[in-house]
Image (cartoon, coloured by chain):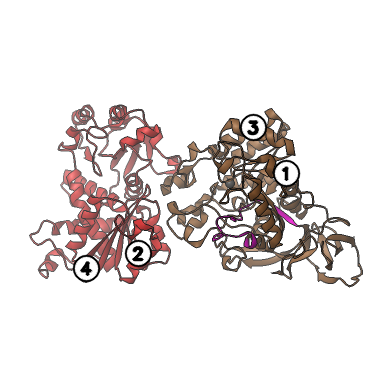
Amino acid sequence: MTAEKYLIRRARLLGERTADLLIADGVIAEVGQDLEAEGARVVEAEGLIALPGFVDVHTHLREPGREDAETVETGTRAAAAGGYTAVCAMANSHPVADTAGVVEQVYELGRAAGWVDVHPVGAVTVGLAGERLSEIGAMAGSRAGVRMFSDDGKCVHNAVLMRRALEYVKTFDGVVAQHAQEPLLTEGAQMNEGAVSADLGLTGWPAVAEESIIARDVLLAQHVGSRVHVCHLSTRGSVEIVRWAKERGIDVTAEVTPHHLLLTDEKARTYDPVYKVNPPLRTEEDVLALREAVADGTIDVIGTDHAPHPIEAKECEWSCAAMGMTGLETALSIVQLALVETGAMDWAGVARIMSVTPARIARIEDQGRPLAAGEPANITLVDPRARRTVVPEDHQTKGRNSPFRGLEVPGSIRATFCHGHPTVLDGAVAGPRTDA
Amino acid sequence: MRHLLDTRDLSRAEAVSLLDTADRMGEVGHREVKKLPALRGRTVVNLFFEDSTRTRISFETAEKRLSADVINFAAKGSSVSKGESLKDTAQTLEAINADAVVIRHPGSGAPQRLATSGWIDAPVINAGDGTHAHPTQALLDAMTLRQHRARLASADTAGTDLAGLRVAIVGDVLHSRVARSNVWLLHTLGAEVTLVAPPTLLPVGVDAWPVAVEYDLDAALARGQDAVMMLRIQRERMNAAFFPSAEEYARLWGLTPERLRALEAAGGGTAILHPGPMNRGLEISSEAADSDRSLVLDQVTNGVSVRMAVLYHLLTGPQAPHGPDEEGHHDR
Ligand SMILES: [Zn+2]
């Protein structure tokens, strides 16, 4: 808790009614009209939209092991700048987060950094090798309290192992987040398989390699009565499978990245590896299906799949380049561009897909809460009228691999309050919590 | 034309102009002194990240016939294999003032990356990248086809394209940069292209290409082709289940002695091309490779002429060269 007091004046809550928010002791003390400042610092929010702080279910913080690419400190600072108040840190670090020791290390690094709440994701299998279950129970029972398990970067492709993992995490009300990629169908894959890969002579990553795993996993989840989460869903066919599964009452949730909502495989024609990502950028038809699926609730959440890489990992020929894109500091803008400005979604919807539902999927109790008195003061103030050009060199992340470089995008983060502390204020990074 | 990365970028006029220049360059090769002074004092670097003695020798011959200074930079045994990046290599070449870079690379798109990244100013010539493009191979094939047609008609090649010429490209299209570059260039020049291959060796997305696709080689040949281009097939492909066995591949998609006899019986002037090196007995029989219809050696000869033409156009501008005869005696 913090002793800081702030009065957010005249914000539009979820883009709807205008109200003041009084923040004290890390919680929302009062919501109402024309509240007294009572010694609080006033934040003028006329024209700004107040949303619950964003929660990213899919962040690669790289630490431990690849501190040249990102650290917990830089990655979470980037998250705060992007309006986030919590991130789920993926397990593919070095060493892999497959023991209580590693997840507690990442959790403590997050607390020490103080920018957002860091919730480590535990690996499903030892070393992401897809052979033996990792210490799932120990990670769940650790100080990090892990509830989400994923081999992200690798697919849990062994059907028996996936079944057991789905069953086992029920002990702790956990969820398995699957990186759906049939490995044999994607050996050496470089980009989406289709008309563009045919022209470019790059090995294709067929949609069926994602869709077949999702189909299998929703059937497994149904069979054993478990909860499964689909990471970075990227094809129209995947949407149809998840829609079918939800209609049958299967407990499945799905995530989409901002870049899959905006960019297509036509970008690969540049052979610029900044567009190389896994799963790959797909076609226009897929992009439109993904947007529609977010709008109708088939896709539940935005996950950034923020994947910073050092410059040399991208400053090379396509085939040698690393896969992945940064995303934390552009997510809101891309969501506004691809979903809000196209009429697919209102701001209450944005709150749902970027905060409320992500927190529910990852079982984070103190995030994604209503903007109401007594709730934790995790709040993001968005200026929807802002226009800005993406300059990766200005970002807080160490990664310069943003595919949106040079793009003019709408929306900016004016303030982020994490448990009552402003990590971002007046549109600039302010400072971390020091009391956590 | 600043670089030659892909035949897809070439207009019909550019392609015909390159082929006209190549025909004139070919005359140089028939003279006692096989040299032009056009690139005297210019430095051309052959940057080979992948072994290809044939292509390197062809480029080197072309460069030397134009009097360029030639530097061969092979990735094997150089700093590249010790982990130096394409960027660092490019900047080294820039620092030594290379006037043109000929690049061969196992990764699709590496020449385009080199040309567009800002690491180097020199014109870039793609000598084959991954499974993407091999534009000088397609140009030498077009040059060979153009000569073949002119010979049959007792006509001149100058200024002509390949309108209406029927060409079948047979074999591993999926992994072939030669096939891709030929598809675009032959289409631009007006030829009618049929791809013949087992479905496993055609890319998903091939239906967007300006070609006909056929699985049955005999049916494609029976419809009448002015040329068949046999692609090299790697025996290892059968290990990845692209086809069951080399024997079955040869039987269904090889230019066997039986198919050669059928071509003879049909009586047309069907020419046989192969980019080399040939797997005799697999995609092409010795009978076919060595028959009168085979233009394989013409392809090799034309390879030098086409590469001279490309270097000439990129380094001295698109205007037609002075007649080799006038310039020839300037040389040593
Ligand atoms: Zn993933």
Q: Residues within 10 Å of mark 3 (few under 14, many from 20)?
A: few
Quote the CA–CA distance across marks 1 and 4. 74 Å
In front: mark 3 or mark 2?
A: 3
In front: mark 1 or mark 2?
A: 1
Badge 1 amino acid: Gly
Q: For mark 1, what is the residue?
A: A141
**Label 1 within 8 A of ligand 1 by Cβ:** no
The answer to whether the residues at label 2 and label 4 have Cβ atoms under 8 Å apart is: no
Work out whether disc 1 and disc 4 sit on a shared chain.
Answer: no
Q: Nearer the viewer, residue A49 or B163?
A: A49
Quote the CA–CA distance across marks 3 and 2. 59 Å
Percent position of residue B311, x then y:
26, 62
Considering the numbered disc 2 on the image, is that residue within a helix, a strand or a loop?
loop
Badge 4 amino acid: Leu
The answer to which quarter of the image holds residue B213 is top left
Tag 4, which chain?
A: B
The answer to whether the residues at label 3 and label 2 have Cβ atoms under 8 Å apart is: no
Considering the numbered disc 4 on the image, is that residue within a helix, a strand or a loop?
loop
Q: For mark 3, what is the residue?
A: A164
Numbered range of the magenta stretch: A53-74
Chain ID for brown: A
Percent position of residue A35, x then y:
91, 67
